[in-house]
Amino acid sequence: MTALQRISKEMQDLADEPLGQFSVGPVGNDLFHCQATIMGPRGSPYEGGLFDLSIDFPESYPFEPPEIKFKTQVYHMNVGPYGDICLDILGKNWSPALSLSKVLLVICVLMTDPNPDDPLRFNLRDEYRKDVSTYERNARMWTQKHAM
């Protein structure tokens, strides 16, 4: 199966059985360049926000992971200032058995449960470890400002 066939199948699977937490589709007619919108998970400081992500598939997909970045600014220790996401399955722990829907679900979980052991923003990690309520209050304020 070629990369294009695999991406097309994953898009069709998402259209047939939408998961409700996010939507995803190609930019124009180019399946190698997609966009997704994640609804801020309930019970998280991101609840009520809509977060846009860019998704770029390599020609070697699914043998290499897609590049996924937040386009919406997000106050999160595992998301860099330019939208990079620190997530092991988007790098060294990628497997061709993973699909875009699984990766987006993991990103939703990361929004609810940040990983202080693998931050991109150490200052936010330190704030989280020192005072979770301050971290969550700041995340809610950023969500209101940038994602609503």
Image (cartoon, rainbow, N blue to C red):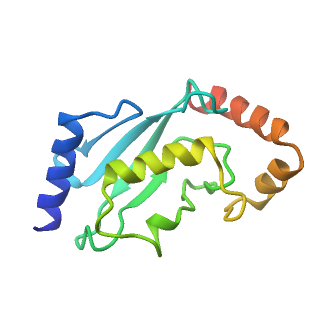
Relative to 107, 9 lies left or right: left
Residue 49 screen position, x and y as percent: 55, 28
Quarter the N terminus occupies: bottom left
Asked whether 77 or 27 is in front, the reply is 77
Note whether 80 is above or below 91 in the view shown.
above
- Residue farthest front in this picture: 97
Task: State the residue at coordinates (65%, 50%).
Answer: 114
Residue 135 screen position, x and y as percent: 79, 41
Relative to 25, 112 lies left or right: right
Task: State the residue at coordinates (36%, 30%).
Answer: 20
* Figure quadrant of residue 115: bottom right
Asked whether 82 or 49 is in front, the reply is 49
- Residue farthest right in this picture: 130
Quarter the C terminus occupies: top right
Residue 61 screen position, x and y as percent: 25, 68
Give the total of numbered labels. 0
Tell me, yes or no, if residue 71 can be seen here. no
Note whether 118 is above or below 146 in the view shown.
below
Residue 70 screen position, x and y as percent: 50, 48
* Figure quadrant of residue 74: top right
Note whether 131 is above or below 120 in the view shown.
above
Relative to 131, 145 lies left or right: left
* Figure quadrant of residue 99: bottom left
Task: State the residue at coordinates (66%, 47%).
Answer: 76
Task: State the residue at coordinates (49%, 49%).
Answer: 107
Relative to 82, 69 lies left or right: left
Tell me, yes or no, if residue 110 can be seen here. yes
